[in-house]
Image: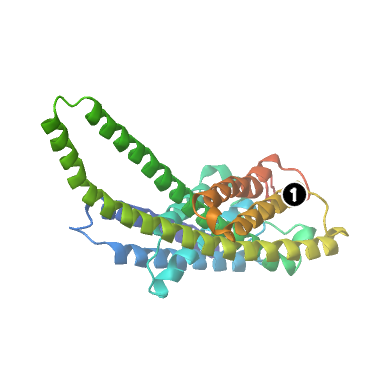
Amino acid sequence: MIFSTLEHILTHISFSIVSIVITLHLITLLGNEIIKPYDSSEKGMIATFLCLTGLLITRWIYSGHFPLSDLYESFIFLSWCFSLIHIVPYFKKRKNYLTTITASSTIFTQGFATSGLLNEIHKPTILVPALQSEWLIMHVSMMILSYAALLCGSLLSVALLVITFRNIFYSSKSNNLLKLNESFSFGEIQYKNERNNIFQKNSFFSDNNYYKAQFIQQLDYWSYRVISLGFIFLTIGILSGAVWANEAWGSYWSWDPKETWAFITWIVFAIYLHIRTKKNLQGANSAIVATLGFLIIWICYFGVNLLGIGLHSYGSFTLTSS
């Protein structure tokens, strides 16, 4: 009873803190010259990380096994991974480009985990025989860590594509306006005035474009770094899962829906990393592959669980005490 109450308290505290962090980020975007809550939001994410750590430890003690046996526990662990990824750059004193992504992802995953959709599996249950193995910690933790890193890296690529295509749209729009001014000018003097005004604004736009280009390069760089880390975790997770499957089911690979989609995910991000080796395909081209990978991850992690079929059906919504 005490552990259940403590778990309930830590869940709501961590969710409340990360909600405040999101609000502080919105305040930063709206008026960062008056209020500078950056440091407060970073400390808020550290507090969220500590609360989620306490929540996982409490559930571990309460259930008697590592808390990765069902969809609810995996969502909580995924939130913990997002908060971990968030605070690493903070302690390394580097500029954190993942702030908005990790905070938003944490509140989304934790909000879903604590929603009424997963009420049936909030209470810890006895592990099914297939999960009563030391490989549980190794395999599942590596897979969830890989999902968190790959999702963050993919979202950076999505942001890169949005900014890139937005720049293309506005540049084409400005070119059309310039042509319009040239074709509808009513005299040479008026045309020269219009052209001079455009050239005066070009200095502002060139500075703006320079900073945008630098920002896009940073997004591309960090997306590659985070996805590379996630790919390593995914590889370790798949290999350890194969060894565990051989011990539990007598075969290394069964083409289970979860295994199949994990393999597809691995292939997609292997293609991404291969594309990154060619300089002419870096940037928007590789970001398109990473964006596709973002959708594939959610199918692998969450979409397959909706079906409730296959050898990994214990992670579905239909999980009960039996």
Does 126 sit left or right of 103 as displayed?
Answer: right
Residue positioned 16% across, 42% down in the render: 196
The secondary structure type at the circle numbered 1 is helix
Please state if 242 lies on the left or on the right of 26 as rendered. right
Which residue is found at the position 58% from the left and 63% from the top?
Answer: 228
The residue at the far right in this view is 250
Q: Is residue 108 visible?
A: yes
Percent of width and height locating residue 35: 21, 59
- Of 278 and 253, nearer the camera is 278
Left or right, 135 with reference to 186: right
Q: Residue furthest front?
A: 188
Image quadrant holding the N terminus, namely bottom right
- In the figure, is residue 234 to the left or right of 14? right
Q: In this figure, which colouring scheme has been used for the structure?
A: rainbow
- Report the residue at 75% width, 64% height from top: 239
- Looking at the image, residue 60 lies above or below residue 290: below
Q: Is residue 124 visible?
A: no
Q: Nearer the viewer, residue 120 or 245?
A: 245
Q: Closer to the camera, 61 or 316?
A: 316
The residue carrying mark 1 is 260
- Residue 314 placed where, x, y %? 72, 50
Q: Along the line of sight, which residue is nearer the eye, 87 or 175? A: 175
Indicate the position of residue 29 as horizontal and vertical percent values: 28, 52
With respect to residue 95, does 110 lie above or below?
above
Number of residues whose C-alpha sits closer than 10 Å to that of mark 1, classed few (under 14), some (14–19) or many (20 or more): some
Which residue is the extreme one toward the bottom? 92
Query: What x and y, as percent, mark residue 186?
Result: 15, 24
Say which amino acid is labelled 1: Thr
